[in-house]
Image: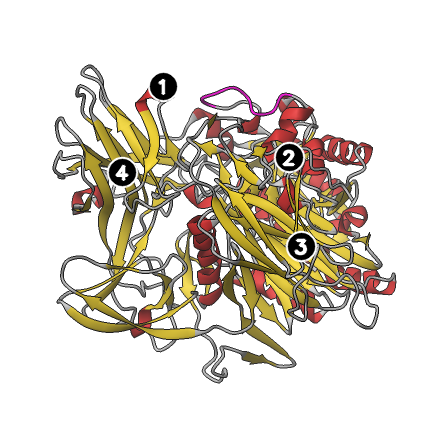
Amino acid sequence: MHHRITRLLGCVTSLAVLTAACAYGPQAEPRDVEEPAVIPMVVRNEQGAPVADAQIAIADDVITTDANGRAEISITAPVVARVSTRDTLVEPVVLDPSDGVTTVHLWDRLADDGTERVSMHFGGDVMLGRRYLDPEASGPLVTDADSARAVVDDLGPLSSAADWTVVNLETVVGELPDEQALVAKRFLLQSTPYITEALDEMGVDLVTLGNNHAYDWGDVGTESTLSILDDAGMAHVGAGHTREEAVRGTLSRVGEHTVGTISFTTVNGSFVNDQLPDGDDEIPIDLPESEAWQYELRSFGYTETALENDDGDPLVVKVDERRIGDVWTIYDEWEDELGEAVLGDFWSAVIGVYPELQDWVARRDHGGAAPYSRSEMESEIARLRADGADTVTVQVHGGYQFADVPSSFVRTIAHRAIDAGADIVIAHHPHVLQGVEWYDGKLIAYSLGNLVFDQDFLATFPSAMLRIISDGTSVLEARILPVMLDRYRPVPVGGRVAQQIIRMIDHRSAIDATSKRVDGLRVGSVFEPADPDADGNGNVDLGNNRTQEAAFIVEHNSGLITTSRVSSNVRIIDSGIGPTALPPCTLVRSDLLPAGTQIGTDLFDWGHFDNASADGLRRRPMHWKVSTVRERWDLVSGASGEDYDDAFSLFTDPNAQTSTQIAARFDVRSHRLFDADAKPLDTEALYEIILDVKRNRGEIPSIRLVSFHFDDTNPTADPESARLNEVSLPIDAPADDEWHHVTIQVPDELFAPGPDGTTPNSATLLVDVPAALRGALTIDNVQVVEWRGPTPSESAVWVEGDLARSESPGAFDIVTSGC
């Protein structure tokens, strides 16, 4: 197993005080040493008895529990602890200064009957190219082996605390020239060979390659990737030089057990080809010259009389001038009838004239990623079982990018895999977190998001690892370990940030919806409530199988996955002064809201400035862009005045305004849930900015909001981003150097359509502080709140709830879950 932990953390005193005052790293700033928070930890075994002499490893420091299984750990920043004894599994735990008593239960390595238990970690999408090598605003993050390890060294103690760790390697690995990449593919991913160092630092034992980027450099890219992984001793599955090699699953020895893995993708390039214009489509007036090939007429013909269709007609395509879309349609129709296995020469002739056609999987006489085939998946599951697999995991790459919930096709594939004998299904491709589900007692994780990736969408920053404890035949425990991508570096997180990530997955597990196209190529969440014959726990009878909603319990900064959702009635007292804040793990039944009430959801989520990153450092505020001039900002005591509650101060001088901006845009969707007819199901939204603010002098500062329309729905065109509207809203708080709670209404003009009728679907937020002599503005708990009323539905509709309010003062009840 590749379990190297080389990072040093802070300065450790005789009392095991871990501080960040003496720790430095990329973009790190020394922080004032606060009074250490003492976290009492209690370590217990499976039976609940205290465990004496358990080791709590934090970087290079080891603390031992006393005879009562207790230890006190003093920290001034979140850290990753690895708890174990000689006879137990290692349990990774994120400790946060805000934690109270933390109880950790250890799994015995051997069950009473002698069966060995093993731990498995699954992570999301990984790459180490593009902005890691050629960033837009700073020097490259990766230049050699050490810097590649540094990108992931905060994650390593968490990700490697398992017997077996698997991630989806969504990239070609090599140093191949751009000229050898696939022609006309919109997004190409190639990572430096140093990525094997990062994989080793994370403790990765197996990478899956069955995805839509494994073939970005064609066969030469596949060869480069496999060769570099083989040379590094990194096991892989899901790609090959032939289809047979690509689809073949692999066996891994994990302790005394054998685990089989299959990896494949449904994203094969054909959907892109389906959108290409044919001979009847008019040439757009504003067509970029770089896209002229889509409408270009080229001479093409092909004859193979030995091949006939179902009507007995031979394969004859007369020579003629045709567009690429027309030729794709001809080829696709023949392949539907005869299959790709006998059409290799035909395909070679087609791409010889139309090299822009996309084909990303191993088929048509070339290598690449493993394409999805139900029959091949089922036969590989059976073969792995026959070859000795105790556990079979299936990894499927598919669905819609950036969608909150899985597509119906991916869900069907996951169910089919379990019906065929798989024990665990892990899906990816959306690049964002999605929910989990129990099906016939087996676990499905629909997307674990990005683990090491460089995308700049706010929704792609939260991540997680799935931890599973298994006895070789069944899942004994499953939990989510929250992770955050902060400036492209994955870090484990604790406190409120961990709870918000768990809630995000909990919500996407609770909502009965699938991703579908609701308006042309635009994707939305379509509500598909459980069968009315389902029992009270949301279980649906599907013949011999059952699907059961997963729910979460927040436990030592992780999310324990359960099989039953617990809900409770909560009385809200609206005094008319302002909305009621809900705990950060709260889900609310929107369909049961009383008339005249609303639930507010924070679209930004990261406007509190508490240090949540388990890296031992005081970094810049998470997901905020700040001045490179250190004298322009600082992290100070927060609005509550409690220890470890941080706020963000911006400083000015007489000659310069100071501004800050959130790191990425947030979504502003007119509707987030649709019925089966693609009609909006949720109510219209209202928006507010709510924050705590303190200022000392000068002119009134402001919140600036800018809306955009971003469109990446057409796979044959580059994404378009249009800036639409901008509003500047005063932060009208007294200049008395005291904290004030401020609510700012967002005007409708921010969401007005552009000149071409496009409506905003994203926005960014800036804070502007006018020039002043020694001026200072301090902000905390910044929220971008989307308010919606009751959802008309006869079935449960859960929403993420941060705030609750009523149109008139008084008491009202809401149904909540998650806390």
Which amino acid type is shown beneath numbered disc 2? Answer: Asp
Q: Earlier in the sequence, mark 3 or mark 4?
A: 3
Verify whether residue 57 appears in magenta. Answer: no
Tag 1 residue: 629
In the picture, measured across the screen, residue 153 lies left or right of residue 646, that is right
Tag 4 residue: 779
In the picture, measured across the screen, residue 524 lies left or right of residue 50, that is left
Q: Residue at x 37, y 30 (%)?
A: 625
Tell me, for residue 395, which label it has, or none. Answer: 3
Q: Residue at x 45, y 32 (%)?
A: 619
Q: Earlier in the sequence, mark 1 or mark 4?
A: 1
Tag 2 residue: 216
Tell me, for residue 350, which label it has, or none. Answer: none
Residue 501 image point, x, y percent: 47, 52
Rounded to the nearest angstrom, the CA distance separating label 2 from label 4 is: 45 Å
Q: Quadrant of the N terminus?
A: top right
Q: Which residues, given as a range, are shown in magenta?
A: 136-143
Q: Is residue 430 visible from the viewing direction of this image? A: yes
> Which element carries disc 3, helix, strand or loop?
strand
Q: Main secondary structure of the magenta part?
A: loop
Of residue 486 and residue 647, the one placed in the foreground of this image is 647
In the picture, measured across the screen, residue 88 lies left or right of residue 738, that is right
Which amino acid type is shown beneath numbered disc 3? Answer: Gln
Q: Earlier in the sequence, mark 3 or mark 2?
A: 2
Rounded to the nearest angstrom, the CA distance separating label 1 from label 4 is: 19 Å
Which amino acid type is shown beneath numbered disc 1? Answer: Val
Q: Earlier in the sequence, mark 2 or mark 1?
A: 2
Verify whether residue 137 appears in magenta. Answer: yes
Of residue 618 and residue 384, the one placed in the foreground of this image is 618
Between disc 2 and disc 1, the foreground one is: 1
